Image: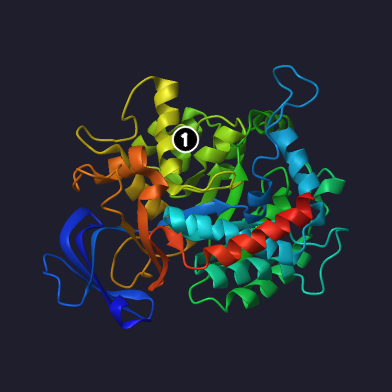
Amino acid sequence: MQADFDTLHFEAAWLPGGWAKDVRLTLSAGRIARVERDVAPRGGEAQHRWGLPGLPNLHSHAFQRAMAGLAERRGPEGGRASDSFWTWREAMYRFVGRMTPDHLLAIAAQAQVEMLESGFTRVGEFHYLHHDADGRPYADPAAMSAAIVAAAAETGIGLTLLPVLYTHSGFGGLPAQPGQRRFVHDVDGFARLLEAARGHAARLPDAVVGVAPHSLRAVTPDQLAQVPHLAGDAPVHCHIAEQEREVADCLAWSGQRPVAWLLDHAPVDARWCLVHATHMTGAETATLAASGAVAGLCPITEANLGDGLFPAEAFLAAGGRIGVGSDSNVRIDAAEELRLLEYGQRLALRRRAVLAGAPGASTAETLFNASVMGGAQALGCSGGLVEGASADIVSLDSHHPGLIGHGPESLLDAWVFAAGSGAIDGVWRHGAKVVSGGRHHAREAIARRYAAVLGDLCG
């Protein structure tokens, strides 16, 4: 670590509980060793105006970054119901057919650069692209996981790797489809994959390896019961109730809605992250909030796919925990995920500041704080600028037009609702500065390689 990164001084920094003035962070071995408030800067010390904790990105499919913009034309059938998540999924299956581990490394690195530049400092990679194009395992069963790890080593982003168990195409154990052959394992094969993935992840300084049963439609109840035991104390993530058709199919199979079935049949607790949970009844919303699990929300992707709106106001009012993720990576922007989360509620309820919580509270502060803490819980790490946590820090550009004239009392609202990712100045990940002046230090080389890969895949 460079000497001038041993301490960082901020005119104001977002600590647990809110803004604090004149904050010095002492960094050691990639972590925050000491937090001091109300201290004057020292001569020669790196000084910045505004400091934030990095935001966890709790749900990503890195490979989908490469197909952004390739599934936006209306299908040939026309009509109200012709285009949906399900038609998008078919386009995704076609796209992954030629992807190799080298392709994936290049795509994941590009996505991770964009994440870091927007203020995300750790990613939960919900990773289900496991096998060769013909569906056979690679000699190293975790070769694709190794590509994700290699990208994280190159970009510096924190990684919570979530290898996915995917065995079936629908509720009731329907056989997998040809387009899913690169995803499919039985439980024993998945255990071998998980062991190999842990070996690769050990090369990173603070990686976490959890598990992810893909969804209730992709694993049987018996398989779902086995997966949490493979995780140990690590996170467990699962897609749930993303689309209305999924809810209808689950009802037809089990007589219960997806969230209700999962809460009744699985040991859902604070280790779990239920991704999307878009379509819930009031009872499901309250029960999920009480479980301690995190709801993993991906507003940009959910809007892109036409999924629907999560009942965020009721969930937060019930004490629920949330985090945000970039999911399909059609657009990577931490501030925009928070902005769309609030804007979706405004459009549905025709009110403003829906998720601010208490009277007089800042909407962006409420969402940012909830997403830092909920995202960290979901990814198995400490959150916020606290002693002992990884030194994952973001500084904002005080000269950005969207932030000029703002102080701490309105700064996060200005960043989320006006300035956006363009206001990110510096990013430190595990104590190392990886973004300066808003640009990742390896951006040019990674972008060149990404361009070559897209030429190969799309040519």
Position of residue 376 measured from the top left corner of the image (x, y, whole percent): 42, 58
In front here: 149 or 411?
Answer: 411
Q: Is residue 35 left or right of residue 337?
A: left
Residue 385 sits in quarter = bottom left
In front here: 46 or 20?
Answer: 46
- Which residue sits at x=72%, y=53%? 222
Q: Is residue 438 left or right of residue 132?
A: left
Quadrant for the N terminus in the image: bottom left
Residue 448 against residue 59 in the figure, above or below: below
Residue 349 sits in quarter = top left
Position of residue 193 measured from the top left corner of the image (x, y, whole percent): 72, 69
Inspect the image, locate mark 1, and give the three-letter code of the amino acid beneath it: Thr
- Which residue sits at x=67%, y=68%? 147
Q: Is residue 152 left or right of residue 73?
A: left
In front here: 199 or 262?
Answer: 199
Position of residue 197 measured from the top left corner of the image (x, y, whole percent): 66, 71
Q: In this figure, which residue is indicated by the disc labeled 1? A: 285
- Which residue sits at x=76%, y=19%? 78
Q: Is residue 251 left or right of residue 90?
A: left
- Which residue sits at x=86%, y=63%? 136
Look at the image and tell me whether residue 392 can be seen.
yes
Look at the image and tell me whether residue 211 can be seen.
no
